[in-house]
Image: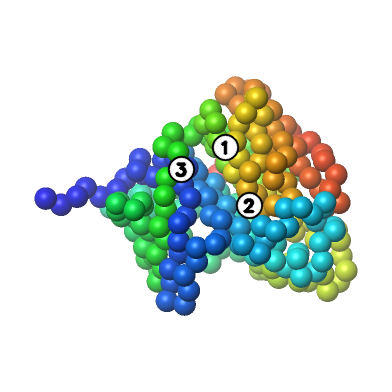
Amino acid sequence: MTEPLPTLADTHGLWQRYWLRTPELEDHTTRVMWMQGEHHHVDMRLPLAAMSLDQAPSLSSLSAEQLRVLARAEGFAGTTSVENGICTWTRIINLQGPLKGIDTGRIIQTAEGLLEVGIHDPYEELWQRVDTTIPQTRLMTNASGQRLFLLWTTTRFAMGLGWKDRTGQSRSLPDEVDHAIACGDNTALADAFDQEFCIGRIEDNQGIIEHSTLPMRCGMRAFDASPLSDSAMPIRVARTDFFGRTVEQEYRDSVMAP
């Protein structure tokens, strides 16, 4: 008897990547986590070399080479669909900036976890579920137009903060960082890193960051969780600027066009 094809419901919850395999490499060290709600996702990918930057007091304290390492982190958020066992992640915000085509993979249920097999590129990723709870979702923007994707359960959350217009720009995040370093332009560096994709826990009514594309933010409070379930209430997100100063920004629910 043929096994039924996976559906979107089979992707709900919090996942951690166990390995990536391509014809050129096998990766077990990059920290990759993906939270999937009913229709939306947040994905965060942090290379091993970037994890050691968690003790840095600020982005401004990093060397040029360390900033380049951090610019290799990945994060994206958007909508998800599954048809005939083919999963498509439509990225609405993307840390790396320009999109490199459609993010699509065939998903297969295995004894080891959820196997993703590339459609347009030759790769395989094995995902293992950390939490089966279906997260709730809020889609928000702040006064500057920055977008916030927030997915959460009673104990975990995933947050993606970014700019939709950067998906259509010509330079990737590493290129933006290289250019800013060459020009000695801290304002441009601050702008390039004015994004964050993170996974954390909710305890004592606070969202606490555990893994982030800004690793020096690990252990910090991201938001007060008490207004999460009331869509009329704004969420005040604690951000850390380029010089390590904490600022709070208010985000309100919005209808996001793809």
Q: Amino acid at mark 3?
A: Val
Quarter-of-image position of residue 94: bottom right
- Apparent side of residue 225 relative to residue 91 in the rendered image (left or right): right
- List the single residue furthest toward the left: 1
Mark nearer the viewer, 1 or 3: 3
Element marked by disc 2: helix
Tell which of 150 and 125 is nearer to you.
125
Q: Are marks 2 and 3 in contact (CB under 8 Å)?
A: no
- Residue position marked by numbered label 2 in the rendering: 164
- Apparent side of residue 124 relative to residue 64 in the rendered image (left or right): left
Q: Position of residue 23 (x, y in %)?
A: 42, 76
Mark nearer the viewer, 2 or 3: 3
Element marked by disc 1: strand
For marks 1 and 3, give the CA distance: 12 Å
Q: Earlier in the sequence, mark 2 or mark 1?
A: 1
Q: Position of residue 40 (x, y in %)?
A: 49, 42
Instruction: Report the disc number at residue 130.
Output: 3
- Residue position marked by numbered label 1 in the rendering: 157
Q: Are marks 1 and 3 in contact (CB under 8 Å)?
A: no
Neighbours of disc 2 within 10 Å: few (<14), some (14-19), many (20+): some
Quarter-of-image position of residue 39: top left
Mark nearer the viewer, 2 or 1: 1
The residue located at (70%, 66%) in the rendering is 69
Neighbours of disc 1 within 10 Å: few (<14), some (14-19), many (20+): many
Q: Amino acid at mark 1?
A: Phe
